[in-house]
């Protein structure tokens, strides 16, 4: 039983009103709220055993290091990594993607090589590849989505050839909601010898994830979209690749030996974790994974499909609403971007805010996709484990009120 009322009791922030109107939080694709279990884990870290990790030969530091490494193991299991050594803590998905671009990309790409990315990528999975292409002389090629917001598999296959050394794409679009057919896409990319970088920022919080079954080479994700504190995320990478890669950042903790004229690197995963890490945040991410596991990722996905089905149906019946991305809930996640007549999404979000309904408006860090769709911005409602159908109803009521004000 997926008991949303019980879940909501774990999220004190959701239980608030402004001008007598209850908060309707529909922006979890930007960042999720945090349950008590995560707040308590972070609080306990600072109150009871906080110290720097991997450095102190005293009880507090050993406890802190243990808890930090326990969190890593939980998160590695959560995505079914073959080894916890393949799980590198980063600040967020953006830093994880930059790590691959600057470490693997600069070392392995050169003129004549192709980097292939989709047309619906978040800037975090596009701009680093633009930079690497500029620095190495490699060519950046974009593969398209169809009018319906699905990957154009025929075009993708046509663009794959032995010059393609790296393919990077999202597992779930933060604008179109599209769940990409990743397994098939990865197998096709491997056939031409390409390395595959999967952006799991939106998918890992919402879908069961198994990096071994997917068979990708790298996957990036953020803690803050999956109930954890901000400031912590992860890169999972295949050990054989990570072992060969140079460090991204250098300094303390990532070294085995340092001399004035040379240094040797620490083993995985610490080779890629320079400096004091986000200790309490990582421990909070471990607690978030426990919370998600208790609910069960399959049950979370079922809840999301139910809510998305309901929302797509209700929204599509609001005159003037144009939903972006696939309309089949099985092919998409719970981030629903839309335009509403000629109301600017920022004006719409401000009006909805007056009803205490929080949505996101703008290009959602996917400006090229909006350019392609010939729109400057969109509004986006996104759901998570604590959202309920009544909140979709409130969104629809507020949209209809906005329609009257803007006379569309
Ligand atoms: N998208 C959104 O509102 P960071 O900011 O590093 O935690 O995540 C970056 C990122 C990468 N890929 C995808 C598919 C994403 O959705 C995001 C973050 C948020 O859509 C904030 S812009």
Image: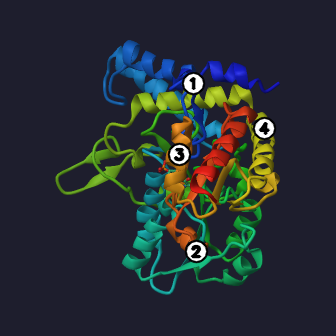
- Residue 223, visible in the rendered structure: no
| Residue that appears at 75% across and 35% down | 389
What is the spatial separation of the Cα atoms under label 2 and label 4, in whole angstroms? 36 Å
Return the mark for residue 35.
1
- Dot 3: element: helix
- Which badge, 4 or 3, comes first in the chain's sequence? 4
- Give the labeled residue for mark 3: 351
- Dot 2: element: loop
Give x and y (percent) for residue 6. Answer: 70, 19
Which-is-in-front pick, marks 2 and 4? 2
Observer-nearest residue: 57 or 376?
Answer: 376
Give x and y (percent) for residue 16. Answer: 54, 23
Name the residue furthest top: 48
Q: Residues within 10 Å of mark 2 (few under 14, many from 20)?
A: few
| Residue that appears at 63% across and 62% down | 341
What is the spatial separation of the Cα atoms under label 4 and label 1, in whole angstroms? 19 Å
Which-is-in-front pick, marks 4 and 1? 1
């Amino acid at each position: 039983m997926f008991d949303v009322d019980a879940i909501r009791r774990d999220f004190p922030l959701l239980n608030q009103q402004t001008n007598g109107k209850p908060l309707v939080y529909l922006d979890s694709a930007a960042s999720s709220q945090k349950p008590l279990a995560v707040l308590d884990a972070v609080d306990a870290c600072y109150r009871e055993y906080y110290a720097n990790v991997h450095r102190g030969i005293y009880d507090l530091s050993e406890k802190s290091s243990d808890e930090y490494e326990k969190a890593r193991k939980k998160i590695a299991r959560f995505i079914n990594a073959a080894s916890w050594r393949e799980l590198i803590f980063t600040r967020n998905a953006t830093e994880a993607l930059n790590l691959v671009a600057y470490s693997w990309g600069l070392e392995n790409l050169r003129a004549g090589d192709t980097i292939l990315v989709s047309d619906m990528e978040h800037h975090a999975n596009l701009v680093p590849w633009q930079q690497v292409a500029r620095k190495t002389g490699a060519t950046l090629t974009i593969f398209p989505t169809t009018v319906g917001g699905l990957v154009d598999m025929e075009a993708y296959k046509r663009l794959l050839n032995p010059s393609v050394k790296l393919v990077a794409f999202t597992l779930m679009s933060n604008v179109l909601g599209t769940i990409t057919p990743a397994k098939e896409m990865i197998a096709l990319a491997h056939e031409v010898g390409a390395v595959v970088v999967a952006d799991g920022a939106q998918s890992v919080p919402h879908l069961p994830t198994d990096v071994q079954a997917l068979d990708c080479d790298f996957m990036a994700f953020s803690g803050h979209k999956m109930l954890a504190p901000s400031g912590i995320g992860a890169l999972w990478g295949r050990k054989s690749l990570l072992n060969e890669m140079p460090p991204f950042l250098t300094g303390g903790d990532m070294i085995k030996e340092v001399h004035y004229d040379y240094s040797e690197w620490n083993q995985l995963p610490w080779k890629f974790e320079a400096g004091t890490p986000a200790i309490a945040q990582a421990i909070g991410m471990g607690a978030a994974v426990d919370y998600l596991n208790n609910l069960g990722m399959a049950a979370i996905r079922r809840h999301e499909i139910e809510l998305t089905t309901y929302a797509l149906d209700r929204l599509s019946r609001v005159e003037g609403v144009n939903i972006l991305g696939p309309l089949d809930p099985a092919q998409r996640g719970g981030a629903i971007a839309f335009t509403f007549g000629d109301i600017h999404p920022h004006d719409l979000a401000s009006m909805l805010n007056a009803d205490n309904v929080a949505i996101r408006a703008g290009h959602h860090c996917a400006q090229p996709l909006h350019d392609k769709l010939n729109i400057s911005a969109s509004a986006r409602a996104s759901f998570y484990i604590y959202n309920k159908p009544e909140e979709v109803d409130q969104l629809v009521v507020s949209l209809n009120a906005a329609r009257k004000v803007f006379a569309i």
